[in-house]
Amino acid sequence: MEDEQKNRRNFLKFGFLAAGLTAAGVALNKVASGDEGAEEKVKVLTADGRLAEVAKSKVESSESLSAASKHVRQGIPGRKFIMVIDLTRCKNARKCLEGCQKMHNFLPPVEWLKVKEMQDSELSGKYWFPQLCYQCDNPPCCKVCPVGATFKRSDGIVGIDNERCIGCKFCMAACPYSSRSFNYGNPKQVEYSKNHPLKSCHTMDPNMVGTVSKCDFCPDFGSKGILPACVRSCPNGVIFYGDENEDVVSNGEQVLRLKDLLVNNGGYRQFEVFGTKPRVYYLPPVNRLFPFKPDPVEHNQEE
Amino acid sequence: MKNNFMNHLFKKLRHGTISVSLITVTCLFINKEAISQAEKDSAKLSATMTVSYKASNGSRSIKVNLKRKVEKKFIAVDNLKTPVSLYFKSVKEHNPADGTGLVGKLYLGKDGEGVFEIPDDINKLISGLHKYTFIAKFDADPIYEDAEEEISIADSKITLSYLGEDSIKTATATLYEWKDSAYVPVAGAELKLGIKRTFSIFPIGESGAVTDSSGKVSADLPLDMPGTFDRKITIVAKIDEHESFGNVEVSKEVPWSVLPEPIPEIGRALWATGDNAPYVLVFSSLSIIAVIWGTIFYLISLLIKIRKIGRDKSS
Amino acid sequence: MEEPKKITNEAEAIQMLRQYNDDLLPRKFGIVGNTWTALLIIIFLTGVYCYTNQLRYGLSITGMRDFVFWGIYISNFVFFVAISLVGSLVTAVLYLLNIPWRAPLSRISEVIAVAAVIFAGLIIIVDMGRPERIVNMFLHGRIQSPIVWDVMVVTTYMTLSILLLYFPLLPGIAFCRDNLKGIPKWQKWMYNILSLGWKYSPEQYHIVKKAITILSVMIIPVALCIHTVTSWLFASTYRPGWDSTNFGAYFVSGAFVVGAGGVIAGMAVLRKFYPSYKTYLTDLHFDRMGKLLVLLTVVYAYFSINEYLIPAYKMKGEEAEHLHELFTGYYAPLFWSVQFFGMVLPIIVLLFKKGRKPIPMFIMAVLVVVGAWFKRYLIVIPTMSYLPIQEIPEAWKHYAPTFQEWAITLGSLAGALLIITFFVRFFPIISVWEVAEERGVSHETIYKHLNEGNEK
Ligand code: SF4
Ligand code: SF4
Ligand code: SF4
């Protein structure tokens, strides 16, 4: 246990350093072009989520951050992240959730983003429904957390502090959308986490057994102006992401005015009746681009 | 190499087909390099490298992308073990041995991409030239065949101007190229205008607009687009993947009057942090706790009293 | 079944007190008692062993998964909280109402309450993914969270219950200290410490009387709180079956039923294994407790009907799915047997005078308690299978407790029973002075008698 803790702290440090390092960009190149002797290399996560290898001696601690720090809890100043999911375009390619899993280093059956079959009423058609954490503006999960391990930031993101979470799972009960996953200590995941010990201050840590996790709206990317992993992975441009204050959302290809998009296409939020005020809007599945085809493979049948 | 060669021989030895004397002879006469190289290459995969150039407000970068074909589809190479090196050719013929002309080395990410930011000193040097070439290459990777790719860029320049009145706000961009020791306007090139947002550039004006004979493109800005809280908005002009200029982008901050909705303070709420709990809740719970635990401590004091009476009696 | 008449004659009273003391002093266990204790210890230690596994490998050793994230640990927690309410019911409510037959029952119920509330606290820690971080609750506690309320109210109730057990016990401990011969040194030492130098003096007696009155008044609202807040853990969510404004009353009424059942079962067991207790736990007590249980069960039935009938009348969305599963689906056999054996049958049997004899009462009490456990299971688990997304793979919502999970849960039940067993072994389970007072013996007489024992 103790060792695990220590390792984690180290990774943490490198994670932040890496962010600083790549912000400079040039620094990384200089390091890499320098003498490549027998110096020990460490892997760091760059700003855009890539792995880079840097000589250990070049990684210095300038700023010590952790998920518990005020900075991370307060969010990125001036931002209000928002998402619009266009149900007319989804054809269950499942690339978004794979991208998310890859980016956040967790293995199936954990899915922070789920794509499920939906049918609203008997005579209406079926459609595919991607669902993630809605980063609610009146978040029941934050209400019930006894220790403030899940918190609402000023940029709209509902974050989780995996170093504080006591694993009571009350937030999972409170979330009406079942958006949350619990790290039960699946041995495969534990093994995988050991070999993929990425950590950044904003993103929650999927490696911490006994704590809760969920979609975090990719704040690491957001702070660097990069779209979330799921948005970038979707081949059909289903997911739009942006900053509500800028009134523009983008799926990587198209760039649209947020208000126009929602007003003209009947944007709605799931379970408005609960008053949770999600930050994720849906465009209704009318005039779908792809006919609904049942998924031949049953996903996530394993325990 | 040597190791490889020896392995190779030992393998053969184990098969018992070659005698010791034969080994010595082979050692003397066969080109070691040739054997091992051929053997290795036959097992390696080939990958396609693409290199693109980007200039953004004067800073330059080179992006390297590595893909390989699997069953008619390109997939990103995510397991390149060696770093990719970038050379700036115009300095000198590149020389991998002493590293001259070397801009940097980079390990590619999971998505098979890497971005070289051109350092300041080289950047200055380039600015004086009007045609330049970069070479990206890697070699001796255990999995992939060596690859090398070259990109040549011709110098270009974009200027961006803005005319803001109350009811009409216009941005105009002009594209120039270096020709015969001067910048001259380029006509007929696709030049895009837009407003910079966090994750994207919101396009303005006609889509697919090309420069006129004086190298200009202009567009009206939407009047209701929110800017920043300090009353600014950033307009951008860019050319994408131009065959001789690459990607070139300039941006300019201009004064703007549409502010975003003010961000409300996170006040006292049920979902806020512990310090921001609603007053009613804090006071009511504190008073209940005080009353009940006050009584409990009183009761405990009674226990102590009982004990004291017991002591007094027995003494 | 007449109430025993009051004793006014002092000599007679002292005679009776001597008799009481001979009958009610704690005694060494026989073979049955020892086997029972050993069995409990084995089950408890198995649970502890499995819990160390859980600490090592995480909650993955349980059957819980993302969609069914609360399992039998939580239903067991609710059960413990429910049964712990009996302490306040029998001791405080009956005390304040001045019910004449409650004295011999008060300590039994208070011990059950203390044991249950201690294990309620422990089992909730067992359910946590990161028990070592419990300290965060104090460092970063958020007053907005029902869990924080629950932690506060459980600790408060635990303290109050222990005090309510301890104050009336003081004379008893002192009497054990003075009169038990041939006991090991540590036991003597324990009595010495715990009796707080009790000298049978009137001042001490008055303090105890005062404390009991204060505690009885205070423990009632706290007891109501503890179970109401526990119900809010569920009712404050949006899930079908939990999202109910009736939940507090429903839980509290159910808790009184299982608590009364627990006391009746305890009475019957004591009477069986300590024949001399027959004089104190008389048929009258069973009769009265039987009537009380019927009353409580009827109240419970009323809230149950509210809880299920109105949603079933409306049958809205997910609520309908949930109710169908309970009424006619997968959980129907369990649901209906719990309703029948845990509620309907006891009401019917206990309405008859013959039904309120110790043996049928014991059977009914066990049915009530076991039924209550499974009722908690039905409250907690089925709800979590109803989700806002359709076509969820079966594996996501299927829950079957694993062996280790059962072992830990049974271990906690065994642990609570162990506390009760040890208490019976070392302390008087029936309060002599309270019983004597109930018979009209004045405190002066009791004081005289006890002092006589003291000087002997
Ligand atoms: S979707 Fe669920 S987990 Fe996400 S913010 Fe809303 S309530 Fe919380
Ligand atoms: S599981 Fe963690 S994040 Fe969720 S409520 Fe409990 S402590 Fe808070
Ligand atoms: S926003 Fe990020 S964390 Fe959330 S589903 Fe997309 S990739 Fe996953």
Image (spheres, rainbow, N blue to C red):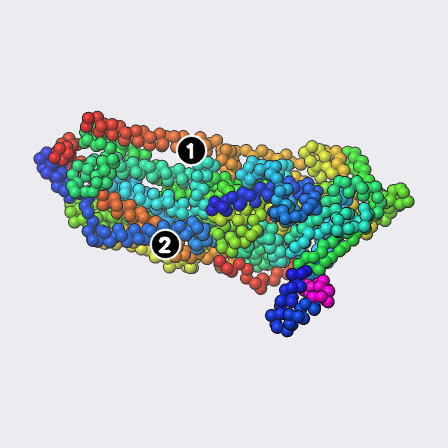
Residue range highlighted in magenta: B27-43
Return the residue at label 2. C407
Q: Tell me which amino acid carries mark 1.
A: Ser
Q: Examine the rendered structure and indicate whether residue C135 appears above or below residue A187.
A: above
* Left or right: residue B296 compared with residue C394: left
Query: Residue C331 falls in which quadrant of the image?
Result: bottom left
Q: Residue at x 76, y 38 (%)?
A: B252
In this orientation, which residue lies closer to the viewer: A202 or A22?
A: A22
Subunit under mark 2: C
User: Could you tell me which secondary element the residue under label 1 belongs to?
Assistant: helix
User: Could you tell me which secondary element the residue under label 2 belongs to?
Assistant: helix
Residue C260 highlighted magenta (yes or no): no
Residue A188, position as x, y percentages in the image: 51, 56
Return the residue at label 1. B285
In this orientation, which residue lies closer to the viewer: B277 or B123?
A: B123
Q: Residue at x 54, y 43 (%)?
A: A9
Residue C397, position as x, y percentages in the image: 47, 56
Residue B28 highlighted magenta (yes or no): yes
* Left or right: residue B50 compared with residue B187: left
The reply to whether residue A178 is visible in this rendering is no
The reply to whether residue A291 is visible in this rendering is yes
Q: Examine the rendered structure and indicate whether residue A188 appears above or below residue A64.
A: below
Q: Tell me which amino acid carries mark 2.
A: Ala
Q: Examine the rendered structure and indicate whether residue C252 appears above or below residue B265.
A: below
